[in-house]
Amino acid sequence: MTPRHVLKTVFGHDEFRGPQARIIDDVLAGQDVVAIMPTGAGKSICYQVPSLIRPGTGLVISPLIALMEDQVRSLRAAGVRAATLNSQSADSGQVWRDMADGQLDLLYVSPERALSEGFAALVARVEIALIAIDEAHCVSQWGHDFRPEYRRLKPFCDALAGVPRIALTATADRETRADIAHQLGIAADRVTLSGFDRPNIRYQVAGRDNLKQQLLTFLGQHRDQAGIIYAPTRNATETIAAFLGEKGIRARPYHAGLDPVSRARHQAEFVSTEDMVMVATIAFGMGIDKPDVRFVAHAGLPRSIEAYYQETGRAGRDGDPAVAQLIWGGEDVARQRGFIAASDGNEAFKAGEARRLNALIAFLDTGGCRRAELLRYFGETPPASCGNCDNCLNPPLQLDATEAARKFLSAVYRTGQRFGAGHITDVLAGKASEKVAKFRHDGLALFGIGRDWPAEQWKALARQLEAMDALERDAAHGGLVLGPAARAILKGEVAISLKQAPPRPRGSRRSDSNIDGSGDTALAAADQPLFEALRAVRRELAADAGVPPYVVFHDSTLRAMATSRPGDRDALARVPGVGASKLDRWGPAFLAAIASSAD
Ligand code: ZN
């Protein structure tokens, strides 16, 4: 069996993508590999195909139970003999008997299970095709999700001499990549990097002024689509989900503090439906293999560029258009600076974290292409413009704000460094608020000197000054105080430019319609009814089989069916995504729907 033969008969695809073929050849030749591949690039194919070809069982170490169960479900639907062993699985006896008999192609285990007593001895008695270490960034303290138990995987792998090991992750900057290879005992020159670009994801960033309203507007452009909103706290997930529920949007909260039953129910509901919004802390998502997530919105600052890339990477895994929307405020930056200062890491660790935060701020602050900014962070040299981010679609106006920044910083200083951006804006705008009267700020020389600017613009400037470290938050009262970068601005040594949304977003209506519906813009109007009919067939088959609709077929496969209208079994087998097992099981129902649409 050749890799291509396996790809076609089992998974229904004709061609490998990107570096898949090269990685598979290396693993088949018994070599170790560190593979860095973006989400949606088909990471798992890189160990699934060689596991089906090499003698013995492929051992996959993966940190989250939900992810393993999802993969096993999809593999079984494709006719692959796969099983999981984790802290929750009961009958491991059958699994070991199957392995000993050569009846198991892939075994997914949690790291805890792999490292548990006796596991190594049992594994030594059966034939192992390869060891795949998924989410390999967990082995590095530089990764965004360090798990100490991953450090014990190297001795485990070393005990299985001659078995190729393949470490995989979607996200790792230069330092993390080198660390993964080192920690897992893989030669540094065995790192394979495929591009980080996710061209189908549109990146958008906005300052936060009224979060709920901003989310509502955003969701209005994504009706009846599945998506994730990441909120900074457990409390925020609950509040936002309740608010969206009141507005008639199907939304559920998800966080580590929720009771396990509700958490599992919300997750299952999200995976098995096509239109739900999950409002979650970052506790949600790593184990989710749902391909049709159409948007990921951040209601606060992610922890780093890597975390942002990982979290937004959960959108559009099926390759259809998706949107990543980030809404941030100055206090987010203050909070992260506080976390870094308070962490018990050493100085080198803190310096590394500060560098990461600054890279994130540069991403927020750029007036240039967001995608280019992201890809440069991962060491690539992308084109200057992508045509699919907010700045490329609607280039912001650059406003000279040097004088305004001095006014704002002076106002912070003159009012005693204890107020927030709202009050400082009132003072500059000459607004006769209660607070202004109480503190007699209407008597200040700079009262009303900023009337020429709207309030939102002053607040945007405050956000930018805070991100630049020209403003900080006082830990005790939360008011703005001058930061280390303020001095040079006040002395006129630094020019400040403020990004401003263009007055009338050019082309935004048209571009929004690209992501309306379910990303099925490639479909001609005449094929739309058949596509909807095929989706209905899929929903029914999925419900019967007790699996999410995408396990039956992805949208892209249904779209190809609606366009090419296969008339018989052979023609259906040629549609991308239709493998032998699914053809037998589900082919007749889809062929019947296609035939009846021709009547
Ligand atoms: Zn761009």
Image (spheres, rainbow, N blue to C red):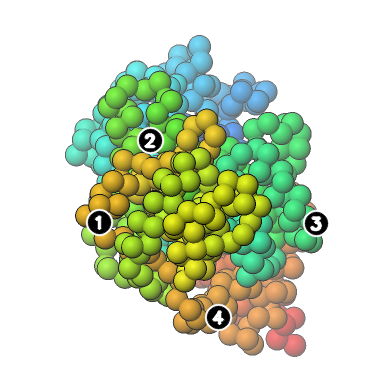
Q: Which of marks 2 and 3 is nearer the N terminus?
A: 2
Amino acid found under the numbered disc labelled 1: Gly
- Give the camera-side residue of 180 and 489: 489
Occupied quadrant, residue 91: top right
Q: Say which residue appears at 63% left-offset and 47% top-offset.
A: 438
The nearer-to-camera label among 4 and 1 is 1
Marks 1 and 3: in contact by CB < 8 Å?
no
Q: Residue 492 carries which label?
A: 1
Relative to 267, 493 lies left or right: left
Q: Look at label 2 and name its amino acid.
A: Gly
For disc 4, the marked residue is: 509
Q: Is mark 3 on a helix, strand or loop?
A: helix
Horizontal and vertical percent for residue 427? 52, 56
Q: Residue furthest top?
A: 117
Q: Distance between the residues labelled 2 and 3?
A: 38 Å
Provide the secondary structure element on which disc 1 rests: loop
- The C terminus lies in quadrant: bottom right
Query: Badges 4 and 1: C-beta atoms under 8 Å apart?
Result: no
Circle 3 residue: 246
Question: As displayed, is residue 345 above or below residue 214?
Answer: above
Dot 3 amino acid type: Glu
Viewer-side label of 2, 4: 4
Q: Distance between the residues labelled 4 and 3?
A: 27 Å
Tell me the tag on residue 143. 2
Residue at coordinates 40% horizontally, 31% vertically from top-left? 340
- Judge whether residue 169 can be spotted in this image: yes
- The amino acid type of the residue labelled 4 equals Arg
| Between discs 4 and 3, the one toward the N terminus | 3
Question: In this image, 290 relative to 48: left or right?
Answer: right
Assess disc 4: are there few (<14), some (14-19) or many (≥20) residues with their C-alpha within 10 Å of its C-alpha.
few
